[in-house]
Image (spheres, rainbow, N blue to C red):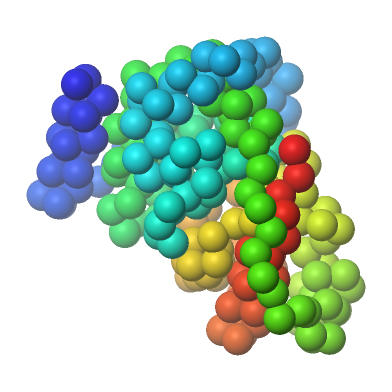
Amino acid sequence: MILLSLVSLSANAFASGHNLPEATAWTQIEWDRTASEMPQGDITRGAELHKTGLCITCHGEHGIAPSRNAPSLAGNTPTYIYKTLLDYQSGLRNEGDGKASVMFAATQPMSKQDMADLATYYATKTVPAKPSAGMDAQIDRLVRKGDVSRMITPCASCHGAHGEGHDEVPALAGQTAHYFVRTMHAYKNGHRKNDINEGMSQFTHDLTEAEIEALAEYYASLKSAK
């Protein structure tokens, strides 16, 4: 009931024109210290929080989103999920379209232990592979080699050869295609700024719409790794 009230109040506040709080961006030193202090996660408690905290409503049973509008969390890295929850709680993660208000409300009652428990639980789950038409040469080049002429680094250099992610870099394998596209637009348009040093804003700047959609379909077709 408390969480439902928080979500309702936050959504109403945003609709009334109230912004989420301003938050200071991470420095690498600050984040490294915070990551090193991340509590040991409890999978069983994380599974319970997933249900009682209503995470299951948007992110689905076992962290596989039932809607194209929400991200699947299954198979992502514990550190990335932990950081994302912290960013929502502080207001740093805010694309300005109102969607962050629900997560801002949902994370207010959470302790760092709660966040670590949820992050550890989701990391144990997987998203099954989806049918794919395959990857064409252009997308293969972007994933494996990038594009030096446009200062685009290869996706695999940060997100892994199979989209598995590592540390605070998110896994992309199995991610909802629509959510992937929306996220890339948020980075490209400067609406999402919670990544350290805002590297994604630079890498997405010159991607075409066709490339973004093709990358989304490619990563959605991959099975997430435990």
Q: Quadrant of residue 92?
A: top left
Q: Quadrant of residue 202?
A: bottom right
- On the picture, is 28 further left or further right than 20? right
Front residue of 25/10: it is 10
- Residue 86 in the image, given as x and y percentages of width and height: 50, 30
- On the picture, is 13 further left or further right than 155? left
- Residue 128 in the image, given as x and y percentages of width and height: 66, 53
- Residue 98 in the image, given as x and y percentages of width and height: 28, 53
Instruction: Decide: is 83 above or below 144.
Output: above
- On the picture, is 48 further left or further right than 98? right
- Residue 159 in the image, given as x and y percentages of width and height: 77, 54
Instruction: Decide: is 13 above or below 187.
Output: above
Where's the C terminus, which quadrant? top right
Residue 163 shows in this picture? yes
Where's the N terminus, which quadrant? top left
Task: Kindly identify the residue that appears in the image at 38 percent across and 45 percent down.
Answer: 58
Task: Kindly identify the residue that appears in the image at 40 percent across and 34 percent down.
Answer: 55
Task: Kindly identify the residue that appears in the image at 21 percent across and 29 percent down.
Answer: 4
Instruction: Decide: is 141 above or below 87.
Output: below
Task: Kindly identify the residue that appears in the image at 63 percent across and 49 percent down.
Answer: 127
Front residue of 65/208: it is 65
